[in-house]
Amino acid sequence: RKEVEQDPGPFNVPEGATVAFNCTYSNSASQSFFWYRQDCRKEPKLLMSVYSSGNEDGRFTAQLNRASQYISLLIRDSKLSDSATYLCVVSLRTGNQFYFGTGTSLTVIP
Amino acid sequence: NAGVMQNPRHLVRRRGQEARLRCSPMKGHSHVYWYRQLPEEGLKFMVYLQKENIIDESGMPKERFSAEFPKEGPSILRIQQVVRGDSAAYFCASSTQSRDTEAFFGQGTRLTVV
């Protein structure tokens, strides 16, 4: 079983739409959670960390449900520049191993 | 503070040659991770190293691939006797040893085997 599972998409949404990505993780010892963004042929970059209380950064909201071992990312008012692959990442309580999901592809259409 | 530096950015090798990929972590980072990304696919974990130690190499093929992170100098991912299937983007990331820290990525090395 994969450590982190994501729906690969693709998600094709019009500008201004709201879109949500989900991610599940298998190891209950997971401690830290992140969403990364990867543009085509570029390196992944941190979008936001995910905290137990949930957190918001502008149009982006991340939520964590430890009981269900589930992480989400909500993007409101989608922009063309949001088109990318979004990677769900978890790391364990012991050690610093990072586990990446395969990513969810988003295309925002004019 | 320079970010994670990988070189070369692009590497072309003929089948059977050796490829050496270098990664210098961010200053103050003692943990290095190597990932491989095939075209149109996700990141696949290869190996996790701390200075002079391999912590987890469960994602690394048993043959032809090796990695090191010496006390001095960059981390090296070495692929011997490359084959066409080794063509991919190889990303290195680094982090501190603190809990709750994120990983920072280099720009990757694109290996093409001809």
Image (tube, rainbow, N blue to C red):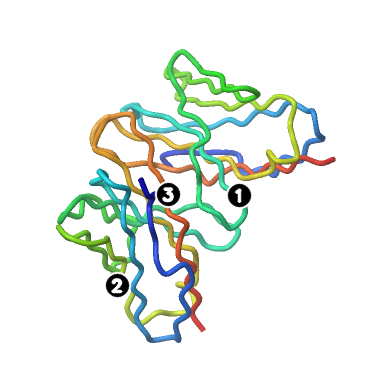
Q: Quick check: can you spot residue A1?
A: no
How far from the left and from the top, in percent, is residue B73?
Answer: 22, 62
Question: In the image, A104: left or right of B42?
Answer: right
Which numbered mark, 2 or 1, is in the foreground of this view?
1
Amino acid on which disc 1 is placed:
Asp
Q: Which mark is residue B105?
A: 3
The residue tagged 1 is A39
Image quarter (top left, top right, bottom left or bottom right) of the N terminus of chain A: top left
Q: Position of residue A2 (x, y in %)?
A: 43, 43
Q: Chain of mark 1?
A: A
Output the chain of dot 2: B
Mark 1 neighbour density, 10 Å: few (under 14) some (14–19) many (20 or more)? some
- Could you tell me which residue is drawn at 37 percent across and 85 percent down? B17
The percent position of residue A27, horizontal first and vertical second, equals: 36, 32
Name the residue rendered at 37%, 28% in the picture: A32
Q: Amino acid at mark 2?
A: Glu
N-terminal label among 2 and 3: 2
Q: Is residue B113 left or right of B73 when viewed as pictured?
A: right
